[in-house]
Amino acid sequence: MAEKIKLNLNRVPMPKQPVAVRRRNFDEVALGYSEEQAIEEAGRCIQCKKPGCMKGCPVEVNIPEFIGAVREGDMPEAARIIKSTNSLPAICGRVCPQETQCEVACALNKKGAPSAIGRLERYVADWERAHPEVGEKQKERVALNGKKVAVVGSGPAGLTCAADLSKLGYGVSIFEAFHVAGGVLMYGIPEFRLPKDVVQAEVDYVKSLGVEIKLDHVIGKIATVDELLQNGYDAVFLAPGAGAPMFLNIPGENLSGVYSANEFLTRTNLMKAYQFPEYDTPIKAGGRVAVIGGGNVAMDASRCALRLGAEEVHLIYRRSEVEMPARAEERENAKEEGVIFRLLTNPDCFIGDEQGKVKAVECYEMELGEPDESGRRRPIRKQGTEFTVPVDTVIVALGTSPNPIVPSTTKGLELTRWGTVKADEDTGRTSKDRVWCGGDMATGAATVISAMGAGKRTAADIDAYLNR
């Protein structure tokens, strides 16, 4: 009779900075596993014969195999397995919502905590970055096939597509509008959640595969998509993200002291406002701050405001915490650090002082009705519940939409009613021949890993198309 496997239902905790220390610095909050902790956590995986975790991974990492290698202490092999399908593992290990993707399908999840797949992926990626000679030795040299692909945008979709195509022998050029590569990974996600040296290392890996990255190149201005196709590129992949902020369109939104989360986070992260005056990017977030929204961007903005000196940060969200799109881990961190959650609350207007500076948010209470098209219960205004919250700064974190510069300069590119590019979900193909699109420009603001999955699927389809 076979011996019954004894399940370890408790995952190894992630070491973190103490709350009192981290809420006033921009260093990474999660400190990462030690080798002993990684091997212990890997030992919890029961190596299912039919692993459900792999079905939940948009970039098709062979999860049981890499975890098995970690369990044996074979980190070079674990890195090789991950890198065979995922070119950005250090990023995924930190910001991918594993709890709703691979980990939710883990067999251990039925009785206890699932395998800490994301934490193990991060450990392996960080180990490889500390041992560059291993990655260099494992890198395969591929002969160029003579075909060229232009990738617009160097965010997660663009980097993934470019890396996969380069591995297949294509000459790939990425056109990035900013002065640094990485897209939302650089400008949108704070240092304490995703260190910029980690992002830069992943960008450098993609470049080491032979990918050319052209910075300060705004497609639609410096060249159009049609001009790229006319000047030697066999295909174009549009992945510039969704960088245009959305607003509430309520009175007072133009007052001084009211920021979009895009501006606030770009100033803080990319322009390093948190290191003022060493970096000449001042930003005010003192006193009382209100952040409007309930996603990861709202959590990021709230936690940045605390670190920039805010005395109080109020997170105003119109639904309950159950409906919040932000990751549970980010909500937990925000609460630990002192962010005040004002749930079932919505702003009606912003009130300014005589100098045109915001001084208060007038809000009202909400209650939840029937589910809407998103599947979440629809918030309904409760009459007679108005109240005022005094504030010095407001950050609006409601999401983003694509910048129209590429669609407006590209003839024959069909759009949706939301202004996103209409693209096939499985292939990325658009209405325009030899043009593909993926990531936030096709879906609207979504997760890093969903954008990576789109980049991966598109690379495979471009390869199939150009080799018909």
Image (tube, helix red, strand yellow):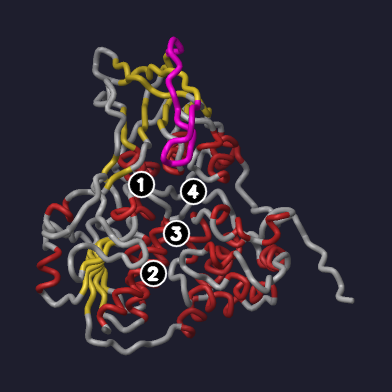
Q: Tell me: residue 372, above or below residue 383.
A: below
Q: Tell me: residue 170, above or below residue 59.
A: below
- Between disc 3 and disc 2, whose residue precedes? 3
Residue range corresponding to the magenta coloring? 368-387
What residue did someone put label 2 on?
Answer: 456
- Looking at the image, can residue 66 be seen? yes
Check whether the beta carbons of the residues at disc 2 and disc 1 lie within 8 A of each other.
no
Crowd tier of the residue under label 1, counting other residues whose Cα lies within 10 Å: few below 14, some 14–19, many 20 or above: many
Residue found at x 11% / y 59%: 411
What residue did someone put label 1 on?
Answer: 272
Residue 276's spot in the image, x, y percent?
Answer: 35, 41
- Outermost residue toward the front in this view: 370
Q: Label 3 to label 4, Cα distance in Å?
A: 19 Å
- Looking at the image, can residue 313 be seen? no
Q: Label 4 to label 1, Cα distance in Å?
A: 12 Å
Residue 13's spot in the image, x, y percent?
Answer: 68, 53
What residue did someone put label 4 on?
Answer: 192
Q: Label 3 to label 2, Cα distance in Å?
A: 10 Å
- Label 3 SS: helix
* Side of 33 where 398 appears, left or right: left
Q: The residue under label 4 is which amino acid type?
A: Phe
Residue found at x 35% / y 20%: 348
Check whether the beta carbons of the residues at disc 4 and disc 1 lie within 8 A of each other.
no
Which label sits in the foreground, 1 or 3?
A: 3
Q: How many marks?
A: 4
Which label sits in the foreground, 3 or 4?
A: 3
Q: Nearer the viewer, residue 411 or 240?
A: 411
Residue 310's spot in the image, x, y percent?
Answer: 45, 29
Residue 2's spot in the image, x, y percent?
Answer: 86, 75
Q: Is 205 contained in the magenta span?
A: no
